[in-house]
Amino acid sequence: MSDPRRSAPHVARNAGPIANVLKTVLPARGLVLEVASGTGEHALHFAHAFPNLLWQPSDPEPAAQRSIDAWRAEAGLANLLPAVALDARAAEWPIAAVDAVLCINMIHISPWAATEGLLRGAARLLAPGAPLFLYGPFLQGGVETAPSNAAFDDSLRARDPEWGLRDLEAVAAAARGFGLDAVVAMPANNLSVVLRKL
Ligand SMILES: C[S@@+](CC[C@H](N)C(=O)[O-])C[C@H]1O[C@@H](n2cnc3c(N)ncnc32)[C@H](O)[C@@H]1O
C-alpha cells in the first residue's frame, strides 16, 4: 500500500514563523481546532511546539484525513487528536466548543462560501475573547499587491473562477461577531490575521 503521508514544501518554511505568532495569540491551555489541515504537517508541528494545548486537525478530503492520521501515528503525540471530517460550509460541525480556531491557506483556495462557513462555524464554537487565526495571502486596500501575489491570484482564478485572493476588508466585514485584533506581515507576502469573538 502506498504511503498516505502527504507533504507540502511550504510548511517547512512557514510553520516556524506561524508558531511565533501563535505564541502571542493562543491560550495557555485548551482545545484548538484546525480547519483545512491538508497534509497535517502544521498540526504535527504545532502539537510539538505547544504541548499544553490539545490539537484537533480536520479536513473534508478523505485523502487529507488519511495523511493527517498517518503523520499522527508516526509521531505518537498525546496532544494530537485523529482527524475529523469537517467542511467549513456545513451548518453543523462535528465539535461543540473549542478555545481557538486556526485556518491556514484555505480562504483563497476555496469558494467564498467556505470563508463564510468558516466565519459562521467559528462564531458558533468560540467563547467571547477566543481567537480565530487565519493565515495566507490577502489583498489589502491601500497596499500595493506584490507581483507574486497578483500572479498567484491569476493562476488560482484560472484553475477555478470561484477561487482567488480575498480582500482582508471583505473578510473582516463578513466576520460578524468578531473584532479584528491583529494583522501581522509574514514572509513571502502572507498575513497572519487574528479575529477575536466579541
Ligand atoms: C491549499 S490546502 C492548505 C492545507 C494546509 N492548511 C496547508 O497550509 O498546507 C487547502 C485545504 O483546504 C481544504 N478545503 C477546501 N475547501 C474546504 C472547505 N469548504 N472546508 C474545509 N476545508 C476545505 C482542502 O481540502 C485543502 O486541504
Image (cartoon, helix red, strand yellow):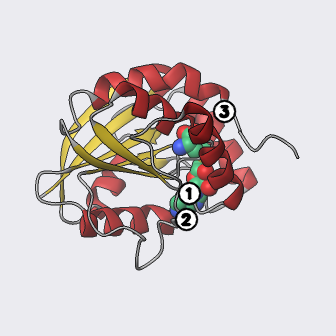
Identity of the residue drawn at 11% across and 51% down: 129
Distance CA(mark 3)–CA(mark 2): 20 Å
The local secondary structure at tag 3 comes to loop
Residue 8: mark: 3
Quickly name the residue at label 2: 85
Left or right: residue 62 versus residue 145 is: right
The local secondary structure at tag 2 comes to loop
Residue 68: give x, y in percent of width and height. Answer: 60, 45
Distance CA(mark 2)–CA(mark 1): 5 Å
N-terminal of the two: label 3 or label 2?
Answer: 3
Residue 97: give x, y in percent of width and height. Answer: 26, 64
Residue 114 in view, yes or no: yes
Which amino acid type corresponds to the residue marked 1 in the rendered image?
Asp
Which amino acid type corresponds to the residue marked 2 in the rendered image?
Ala
Identity of the residue drawn at 54% across and 50% down: 108
N-terminal of the two: label 2 or label 1?
Answer: 1
